[in-house]
Amino acid sequence: MTTIQKKAANPAAHLSPEDVEEIGRRLDEIRQSVLDTRGERDAAYIRRVIDAQRKLELGSRAVLLFSILPPAWVVGTTGLAIAKIIENMEIGHNVMHGQWDWMRDPKIHSTTWEWDNASPADQWKHSHNELHHTYTNVVGKDNDLGYGIMRVDEEQRWHPMYLAQPLWNFINACFFEYGIAAYDLELGKNLASKKRRSSPDFKARAKVTLKKIRNQMTKDYVLHPLLSGPSALTTLSANFTANLVRNLWTHSVIMCGHFPEGVETFEKTSIDGETRGEWYLRQMLGSANISGSQAMHFMTGNLSHQVEHHLFPDLPSNRYAEIAPQVRALFDEYGLRYHSAPLVAQVASAWHKVFRLSLPNGFMEAPASSVTLLATKRGRRELRRRPAA
């Protein structure tokens, strides 16, 4: 191992326990500063976004009634894809996180919102809000890490089936909404056990999911095409294309936030007895941002600020850009890497990792700056053993 690799292997080894808790205290102050200043400006923002998204979707579907004409197909499909991305990412994802519950608007509330997606809102909120954000990048606990179908760390035992993981990942990207529904249901684990698949709870949840999928498919692939009359087939293809674009975009954004080279993963035992400061530190080391324009941030649902989102998942998404410089300054002050790169670079890095981990260790080099699970365990153990400074 080179000197550079050794330095990268312990991203938090230079921090004392007091440092970690001070980082947590400082981050709590940043969070509170946003909570104290939420108000009409923020409420107006989300209402404006919802209104614009609905008008864009309605207008695009109207144009697709004439999709037998190529220009109408292109315009309508483009508009519908954008509308679906905005609804899923900047609206649905963030509303269901409870970011706007403080408004006490029953129409824009985490308990009432149902999104344009195959996964039922209640099941998604459990797997995402309760599990993913609690166990961010903990191997075996966080289903968002590799979606439960990929090898995500060098210490996971390699098996020949992993050779196909680039293919599985691509298929999952194309049909991502159904992949989300499947692991919200914990489909693999439940189907593997006769006792689990026959349980009333699983059957009830599966029934709800199948109903949601049926409703989604009826809307996009039956009702809307039939309303288009002579344009039925071209409208059907437009809806399929819009869903495909939405799925590929969403998958790419999420991969960029969790899976590029250098983003930390954690073993289950490393979070035993985890303090508030250590939880914050895990979010800092286990997330990556996408740099870019304001429009790009908007189209990612502000998940381009994945570091800030993982630190503060319940803060309004429109405030992440505002607090990002403060968060980055804290990284710099404590000598931690703030992982941020343009979209193309992050997508390429994430796919590099998918291919690298599909092979036995040593067949494909990891970048010198990447941090492995082994490094994380060593760093956490050293951190806990260190006496107070």
Image (cartoon, helix red, strand yellow):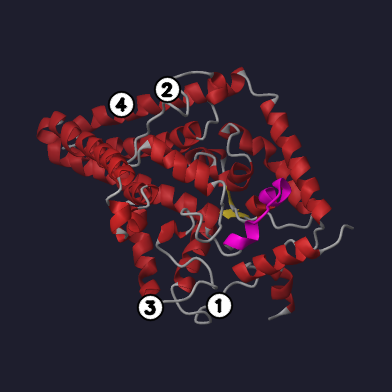
- Relative to 386, is 129 above or below? above
Which residue is at the front of the view, 202 or 360?
Answer: 202
Nearer to us in this view, 31 or 131: 131
In the image, what residue type sits under mark 3? Pro
Residues at marks 2 and 1, CA–CA distance in whole angstroms: 48 Å
Distance, label 3 to label 1, CA atoms, is 19 Å
Which image quadrant: the C terminus? Answer: bottom right
Q: Report the span colored magenta.
A: 268-280
**Type of residue at label 4?**
Leu
On the image, which quarter does residue 114 sit in? top left
Residue wearing tag 3: 160
Instruction: Report the amino acid beneath label 2.
Output: Asp
The residue under label 2 is 51
Queried whether the magenta region covers residue 2, the answer comes back as no
Percent x, y of residue 117 = 34, 39
User: Which of marks 3 and 2 precedes in the sequence?
Assistant: 2
Gap between marks 2 and 4, in whole Å? 11 Å
Q: Which residue is mark 1?
A: 365
Can residue 13 be seen at all in this image of the molecule?
A: no
Mark 3: few/some/many CA within 10 Å (<14, 14-19, 20+): few
Contact (CB < 8 A) between labels 2 and 1? no
The percent coordinates of residue 312 (x first, y second) are: 63, 39
- Please report whichever mark, 4 or 1, sits nearer to the chain's N-terminal start: 4
Q: Earlier in the sequence, mark 2 or mark 4?
A: 2
Q: Which label sits on residue 58?
A: 4
- Element at label 1: loop
Q: Is residue 171 above or below residue 73?
A: below
Label 2 neighbourhood size at 10 Å, few (<14), some (14-19), many (20+)?
few
Q: CA distance from mark 2 to mark 3?
A: 49 Å
Calculate the distance from the C-alpha at mark 4 to the C-alpha at mark 3: 47 Å
Mark 4 nearby-residue class (10 Å; few <14, some 14–19, many ≥20): some
- Does the residue at mark 4 contact the one at mark 3 (Cβ under 8 Å)? no
